[in-house]
Each structure stands twice: as structure tokens, then as C-alpha cells.
Image (tube, rainbow, N blue to C red):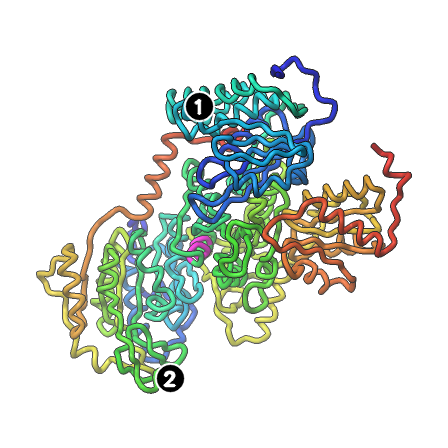
Amino acid sequence: MSKVVDEQQPSPQSYKTDEHPIWCPGCGDFGVLDSLYKSLAGLKIDPKDLVVVSGIGCSGRTPGFIKSYGFHSVHGRVLPVALGVKLANPALHVIGVGGDGDGFAIGGGHIPHAARRNPDFTYIIMDNSTYGLTKGQYSPTSPTGFQAGSTPYGNIEQPLNPLAMLIAYGASFVGQGYSGKPRELSELITKAMEHKGFAFLNVISPCITFYNTYKIVPARLAEVPKDHDPTDRAKAFALALKTEQVSLGIFYQVERPTFEDGVAQVITKAQAASRPRLEEIFAEFS
Amino acid sequence: MPSNSNLAAPAKPVDYVFRVGGEGGEGVISTGEMLTQTLARAGFEIYTFRTYPAEIKGGHANFQVRASGNLLLSSGAVVDVLLAFNEEAYQKHVKDVRSGGVLIYDSDSFQPPSTDSLISYAVPLTSLATEKVGIKLTKNIVALGVLGQLFDIPLATFQELLKDRFARKGETVVQKNLTALQVGADYVKQIKKLDAILLGPGPRKTKELVLSGNESLALGAIASGCRIYAGYPITPATDIMEFLARELPKLGGFVVQTEDEISAIGTVLGASFAGKKAMTGTSGPGFSLMVEMIGLAVVAELPAVIVDVQRVGPSTGMPTKTEQGDLYLAVYGGHGNCPRIVMALTSVEDCFYGIMRAFNLAEQFQMPVVVLSDASLGHRKATVPVPDISRVPVVERRKPDAAALKNYKRYAFTPDHISPMSVPGIEGGGYVAEGLEHDEIGYPAASDHENHLRLTQKRYGKFKEVEQMANELVKIYGEPHPEIGIIGWGSTEGVIREAVQMAQDAGYSVGALHPKILYPQPLAKLTEFIKGTKAVIIPEVNYTGQFATLLRKRFAYDFIQLNKCIGLPFTPKEIFDKIEEVAVHVQSRRRAAAFATKL
């Protein structure tokens, strides 16, 4: 990943825009946003080369708060739009942001394919286990028994396990952070952005209004063990299955060719055989 | 037996329809394609039609090619020559062969009942292939040799084509095919020719391309500068994706086969946002899935080209059959006030220039352009002159200048409602492409009531100029101010044109108007055309008359619908018959003296 040539260290504040976040005071997303500012400054990302893509939900407003180019798309379609941006201009830094509803419910069908293709961008899920913007319905990561507007008698479904899912799909970087630990979160975001390939971060980002887990998460926090080998997929999977704890850090990370590498290879291969002008393509049909 | 050169040219200009029928997956389509290519290279205009089963192997397939010395506008009314590889092909198609037409059949496969109305040639195609060539599959090539020798289609042209086509498979394969061709030709030399069909070399001496509608469209996209295509396999649009997957990387572009059509259009919008010309192609089911994102492209003002090669719906419908049933969806699909441009492609040649215009419109007006083709157009082949790219100069989107970047407003109000569009990488041009209603800058303004009206007016305001262009992109055939008018759209252009010619020859006052941009509509041209008519017929390959319904919203006029809804395109005769019926009804008299003697 190329960094800006300017030697001067930008401040995290310099990535703020005039638009003020509409989130509820105390929302976990503030922690994620602050961590993002810090990582962008640390990596000296030039705002003109940064694209932040979002879907719909509280997290969907994030692009407006970051000095960059942004794309506030429709519900669940962060990954296709981000892929298109990267395909058009591989030199851009691309970050996709979304919530657990946007990413795992309506947009869940795109995740395995992003993981397979391995485009070089970072995908941050702000996981609050509820639909905050529509006032607190259960989400794919809500626990069984979760009582809310659409589950007045309690959620009868089993929550999905985002980390296990992404590891199973073959994402090349899978990590977890917590909005209540912004310093560690920023370090994790930086590592995700430095990773060459599809980097997935599940960030526990509590909804202060509809499902405030700030009181229950800290007791369950754990660090990814120091001796954990992130290239060992089976061990990463085993760690992800320990759902009684919220482990923070990198679960899985391997280097493999990116989507853009593949595209470049195909182009090289095709052009080695021929680089026709349009007139020459016409001639094939006469 | 005729030799290939020393016969006098036939008195009447060549215009013959050949149809090949047989088991799907056994080379019927490729036999038809090779015959087509040879006829085109020999100097004839060609027009093909094919139907094929939904099954990959088995089922019935047939391929029809009409060859003429003149410009062809339809697949033809009757069949002159039927080549039947099996009994099913004979049963299905013999009724379409004109009286005195020719039947060639594989006598190893079946024996048709004897008849006086046809000239029949029994050719043991299978045993000639197995015994004389040694490969059963070459029976198709043996059949081509039969056709070539019997009808004086230059064998040298067949030979040249076989060499081109099989060169990649090696000299042995080429030789086997040349042998098969000769076996077929030799067989004919020892039988008596009973029919009078002779083609010889065609009148056209210049080279033309033989393209399907989908191929022509894909070439036009390349010419427009499209370098990214995202799509999901779907009949009858898949070959656009496959064509571009082969060609785009050679030009530095790429095709991504996405996980679904939603992802396809999402990828296109992402790529367009990042500054590239991008396109997706699909058919009805996929187009239905894309509708939400069309709204996003409208409100975020992103250029995008969406091709819908229509097939029979609703739902899975009849995937390999043709219909013009997606016009409502193209025009109205999506929630809210959602202006987009809808175009329809009218011929194989128009697929090339039409898609170029679509890219230009998308770039110029920063909106999605839906381009309607259909199965009959996408999959038929025709001879077209080598495209002249300079006919449609390529347009690029408006970029912000230094002044605009000082205090950049992505959705700035301008006199023509088009705002300069920045792309990532431009210093000072950062903005959020916003699906929420937004202000001039691009900031969300989801609670500002007056702002919503202003932005809606801005988005619709672009239509003024588009409508002017729509008025320029109208074709008129026959009389410009007729008593009986016809308004068609899309792939019916050729048959309507032919029907108009038939009706004019019969002395009727007839003219047809065929717009290329269907939405916004070319109101000035439509008004001018409709004014003074006694009746206007709107032929459509759908059940309810979708274009007629759109026009009724704008014109207090009692349009007469002609609808066909059996998964097949119109024939010129069907439209001609309607003209006659309407003429009687509105007492539009033939001007026999003036027109009938024209010949």
C-alpha cells in the first residue's frame, strides 16, 4: 500500500469533515470513527486517494464524516460497489463499512464471494447485534431469546458467528475489535489496511439506545493469545468458536494473490497473445 | 449439373430462405452459421433466425438464413430450402416450405411421405459421413457440400471458411472437413437437379461483417470506451459477457462474473463512480433484481449502461424465446421519482451505434441508460457494413475545473442541470455519492422538504435536452404524413419497414415512425407524425401494448394495438394484414394507379 509522499504527519483531526455524526451520544460507532481517523493519519493516507463505501444503517453515514471520497450506497451492497471502485482504479485505498444487518443479513450473499476474490480492501462491520436505525429489532448476531419489536416473545434463531463464517469462506484477514478499546482498535484497523487482500474486521460497537452491551462485553473480553498462529486456519476457526469470550485481535491472516493481481495477470496474458485495434477485432467477423 | 461459373445469372434477384433442422447439440446451429458466413462472404446480404431448445443436449434446434442480393429487413415469409437431419425437423417445418420448394433430408434417418408439392432430394448424409469421411459428426459438413454443389454457392468460399474455422484444431481436422465438403458435392454431381435455385456469387464485392445483435452491441461498447463489464450468466444475454471476457483484457479491461445481478450493477456503479465506463447486461429476471440500484444511479447521478436482452416473462418464462415485455420495468422500475433514459435497439447494425449512443447519454447526463434488445435481435446474425466509429463521436462526462474544485459541490445547480463530476484521485474533489436525498454539496438532506423538490427538478431537468436528442433519433419509413401510421419500437423495425413497403406497393398511404429513445419520448416528432393520420397501429411483441400505453398517457389518440405474444417475432405479412384491415375500417383507399405500377 502506497503512502503519501508528504513527510508531515497528518493529524487524526484533519480527516474530520464539517458533517457532524448523527449518532446517539455514546454510540459505539464514535469509537470506530475515532480509531479510523487515527489509522488514516498513522498511514498518512491522502484523502484524495481514499474511498469509503457504506450501505444503510447507522454505520452507513460514516463516509460523510471522513475527509475522502465516499459512496453511501443501498442496503447490503457495500462489497459489490467497493469491488467496482477497486476494479476501476486499483491504486485507491478502499474501506467498506457497514453494520451486522447490512453485512450479514441483506448483504450476506456477497461476503463469500468477496472472501474468495480477495480484493485489496478493508471491510469493517460495526456489530451491535441489533437494527439501531429501525429501532432495535433483532439482527443476525442477536442472541437467542433477544426480545424486541419484531420478537416480542424472544428471538428463536441462533446467532451467526461472523469470525467463523469469514474464516470458513477463506477471507485472507479476519480480526475482531471493540469500540470501547479505541487504541487497540486503531492498531487493528491499521494492520487490516496494511494487509494485501480482503481484510475483514468485526468490531463490537454497542448500540447505546436499543441494546447497550457496554456493561456485559468488558467481562467477556479476551485477547487473541500471544502464541496464536494466525496462519493456522484450523486454530483460527477453533478460536472463533469460543463464543463465550470476545477475543480481540487477528484471528487469521495469510497472503495470497489479490483480485487485482488476477486481473493484471489476465490482461498480461491476453495482451501477450494479441493487442488488437478495434479494426482488427472487426476483421474476425468478416 | 451446374458447374459453378458458366451458367447465366438467374433473371430474378436472389432471395432465398434456407432452414436447417435437427437434434439440438448435434451441430444444427453451427451448420447454419457456416452456411450464413459463406453466403455473406460470397457477397449476399443475410438475415438469420434461430430457435433452440432450453435443453443443452437433445430437443429440437433449427437455424434459418435468408440470403439476398438486396438489403434484408426480416427473416422472410416462407422457406425455399429445408435441410432436415431427422424426422422431427421434417414434421415441424415442412408446412413452412413454399409450394415447389426444396427438401433435402438425411435418408439414413427417415423417409418422408412422397409429395408433389416439394422437390425432394434423399441424401444419405450419415452413411456418407461414416463411410466416406470416417467421422459421423461430419454429416453437417457433407450437407454443406450438398447445398454448395446443388445451389451453386461457391465451394471455394466454403473451403476458405472451413480452413479459417478449423485451423486452430490442426491440419488433420481441416483436411477431414474439406473431404466431407467434397463428399457432399460429389454426391450431388451424380444426381439430377430438379429445382431452379441457383445463387452463384453475390452482387456485393466489398467486405461486410457477419454479426449477431449481441456481438454488434459488444463491439459498440468497446468502441465507446467501455472497459469494465460486470454480469451474471443469463439467456439470451450471456454471449455479450463471454464476448467481452475474451476481448476486453486485450484492451486492458476486464469482465467480472458476479455472484448475482445486484452485485453486477453494484460493481458497475462503483466502477463508474471511480471514473470508468462500465456496463452490465442481463435479461428480465436479472433486470428485475437491478431495479433498486437503478434508483441509486439516478439519485447519485452516476453514468451507467444497463442492457436488457428481453426474453419471455414473467418470472423464468420462456428463456430462449423473444418478447418486448420489459418496457414498463425499464421506464418505471424503481420507487420514487426516478428519471432514467430508456433506449431500444432496432437492428444488428443499430446495436453497434445504439450502444455507443447509450454510453454517450449516460456520460453526458450522468444517469443510468437502460438499453432494450431482445432474444430475436440478440441472437440473429446479419451482414453489416464495417462500422464507422466517427458516426457517433464519443462523449466524456463533465469534469470539474479548478474554479469548481475550490469549493466543490458535486450536485451544483447549473443551467443544464448537469453538475461537474469529480472522480477519486482529484485533489479537492472529494464528495459522497449519496443515495439519501442530498443538497448541492452532497450532504444528506433527508428532512429538507424544499431541497427535495429542487433536486428532483434538477434530475428531471436533464430530460429537456435528452428529449431534443430523442427527436433527432427517430426513423421514418414510407410516407412521412401517411393516412395509416405505424409506430414501432426496438427489433420490429425491419419487419415494419418491409410491411410498409408491401403496403405502399399495394397502393396504401402508409408510413412508420420508429424512435430509438423511448423515454423521455420524442414528443415533437410523434405529434407531427400522428397529426393527420386516420389511424395509427402500434405493433408490439407483448400482450398488453406497453408502448401504446405509454403513448396514450401523452396523446389523446385512439391507437390501434397489434400484439403478438407467442415468443416469436412478427412477420411482415402479419403487419401488412393489419394495415389492410385498418385501411378498410378507416376507409383509406388504395391509390392503385399511382403506386401499383411503380415496379
Figure disc tally: 2
Disc 1 residue type (three-letter): Asn
Q: Amino acid at mark 2?
A: Gly
Q: Where A63 falls versus B100 (above or below)? A: below
Residue at 34% across, 83% down? A151
The subunit letter for the residue under badge 2 reads: A
Image coords of residue B415 (percent x, y): 65, 58
Between circles 1 and 2, the one closer to the viewer is 1
**What residue would you read off at disc 1?**
B177
Residue occupying image coordinates x 50% and y 48%: B236
Whether residue B351 is visible: yes
Front-lying residue, B326 or B471: B326
Quadrant the C terminus of chain B occupies: top right
Q: Which residues are magenta?
A: B263-268
User: Residue A25 appears at what percent x and percent y?
Assistant: 34, 80
Residue at the limit of the structure toward the left, as seen here = A227
